[in-house]
Amino acid sequence: MCLANQKGGVGKTTTAINLGTALAAIGETVLLIDLDPQGNASTGLGIDRAARTTTSFDVLLGEVRLSEAICGTAVPGFHLVPASMDLLGVEVELSGHERRIHRLADALAEHMSDIDNSRYSYIFIDCPPSLNMLTLNAMVAAQSVLVPLQCEFFALEGLSQLLSTIEQVKGSLNPALDIQGIVLTMFDARNNLSAQVDADVRDHFDGLVYDTVIPRNVRVSEAPSFGKPALLYDHKCSGSRAYMQLAGELVRRERARQAA
């Protein structure tokens, strides 16, 4: 499942970190592949840049197997493939490769064929805030897309562009790709605009929008500077509680999808 939105600052990486942590807290096994050159998911999980000797860049180039790039985190059951700034050069490095947008899909297929390594109940891919080759690699590799959407005016404009891209990928590159859901983030109950965006998104995309809404929360914003998910930094804050609720809702949705 890739987390994608070409608009930056929508809570995409924050959702990847904290949703993964919440799922691990209820007994699921989770792998997060950081595919953003900024490497914020890696930083937010406490992986120092100097310690990222093997990264998603090496996996895309085929220099290592996916299993060789996986490292542990402070959260039991939650593992990570870290990212580095080297990802900025991946388009140049793979420009002549005929399967350049299938590199992650190929690496995952090889990984999942190994029974010992296919132990994860959820694999998340954190995409960069742009619709580039890294995001295309994620969408070609994924079964579904989870869209974090900030509760602000311009959110809907960016969403329509993203959904168009998903449909194009589904039509030509990955017929199995689906929209898993839309998660509203940074909701401010004191702001009428947040409520209006919430209502508009639910009106346009009925059934896709999660019931759980992630509130704007200072403790969630502070947590990455300590290299911790919000659930480890302050499990009682409103943001942490919301991500726990979101994890439960996601599990129920996935079970329903599999049963259908």
Image (cartoon, rainbow, N blue to C red):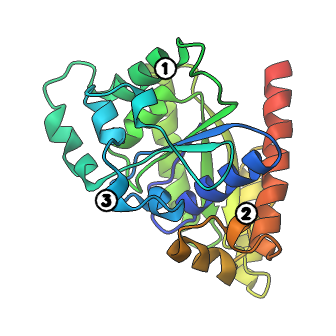
- How packed mark 3 is, by other alpha carbons closer than 10 Å (few <14, some 14-19, many 20 or more), is few
Which residue is depicted at the point 32% across and 45% down?
Answer: 132
Residue 254 occupies quadrant: top right
Q: Nearer the viewer, mark 2 or mark 1?
A: 1
Q: Quadrant of the N terminus?
A: top right
Question: Is residue 260 visible in the rendered structure shown here?
Answer: no
- Residue indicated by mark 3: 50
Inter-mark Cα distance, 2 to 1:
41 Å
Inter-mark Cα distance, 3 to 1:
26 Å
Say which label, 2 or 3, has the lower sequence index.
3
Which residue is depicted at the point 19% across and 31% down?
Answer: 94
Q: Quadrant of the C terminus?
A: top right
Residue 200: assigned label:
2
- Residue indicated by mark 1: 111
Q: Amino acid at mark 1?
A: His
Residue 124 locus on image (x, y percent): 57, 41
Helix, strand, or loop for circle 3? Answer: helix
- Between 33 and 175, the residue placed more toward the observer is 33
- How packed mark 2 is, by other alpha carbons closer than 10 Å (few <14, some 14-19, many 20 or more), is few
Q: Amino acid at mark 2?
A: Asp
From the viewer's perspective, tell me whether residue 54 is left or right of residue 241: left
Residue 59 occupies quadrant: top left
Which residue is depicted at the point 59% across and 53% down?
Answer: 16
Residue 79 occupies quadrant: top right
Say which label, 3 or 1, has the lower sequence index.
3
- Between 182 and 249, the residue placed more toward the observer is 249
Inter-mark Cα distance, 2 to 3:
44 Å
Helix, strand, or loop for circle 2? Answer: helix
